[in-house]
Image: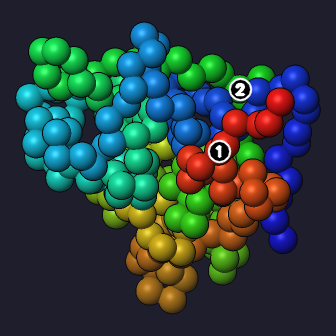
Amino acid sequence: MTKRIPRDADEIVYPKCRLTEMGKEYVGTMNVTESGSPCLRWDSPAVTSSFLDVGKGFDKYMFYYEHFLSQDPSLHENFCRNPTSNTGPWCFIRTSDGITWEKCSIPLCDDLGAPECKLTQKGAEYIGARNRALSGSPCMSWSSTSGANALYAFWKQTFPDSITASHNYCRNPNGKMGGPWCIVSDAESSEEAWGYCDVQFCEMEQKEMTCEIEGCCQPSEP
């Protein structure tokens, strides 16, 4: 069953806004910076050939694509994102001096409660509180178990939120096609395993869903 995101005519709701200060979970379609400069595509040759020179927190020991939710820069087109855990969403822009970066003005949502549903197939943006796998097994903390801790260390850039000692919520840091998952304990072998979680799609009008996530919105007629 899908989950409904409440709507209010005057309310700024996710995904048009960010749920956290850092905004790593932001998957809206803003594609201009605070100064009004147009954002470059994250997968454009101009960006992929110079991202380490420009800086902004990319880990030189990780592949470029590994910094992004779903581990696929092309899915994020030229929308403001925060793949490097900076203070907020940003993007690359072109200036007379070459490629640089600039912050985007993404407002905080009026309701900061994370929806218990996903907006994309992989659900890498999900920051809800579901903490049981489909099997019913409770999820283990990402930071307190040996296997999960190693995974977090490797994929920390692509978690949509910060990991605390008690964080055992379903996430999809490595872009699994089945959606959010978590580490569970295998009762038969007493070893760690993993399992998908039952995170359903948010219930939105199909046209609105396509518009907001795929960035094909058209201005309304007067």
C-alpha separation, residue under disc 1 versus residue under disc 2: 20 Å
**In this orientation, which residue lies closer to the viewer: 167 or 112?**
112
Residue type pointed to by label 1: Cys
Q: Nearer the viewer, mark 1 or mark 2?
A: 1
Q: Residues within 10 Å of mark 2 (few under 14, many from 20)?
A: some
Residue 181 spot, x, y in % from top left = 53, 66
Residue 82 spot, x, y in % from top left = 40, 33
For residue 131, above or below residue 46: below
Q: Is residue 113 visible?
A: no
Residue 109 shows which numbered tag?
Answer: 2
Residue to which mark 1 is pinned: 217
Residue at 44 percent across and 76 percent down: it is: 193
Residue 149 spot, x, y in % from top left = 35, 53
Give left or right: position of 41 versus 137. left
Give left or right: position of 29 versus 204. left
State which tag comes first along the sequence, 1 or 2.
2
Give left or right: position of 82 versus 45. right
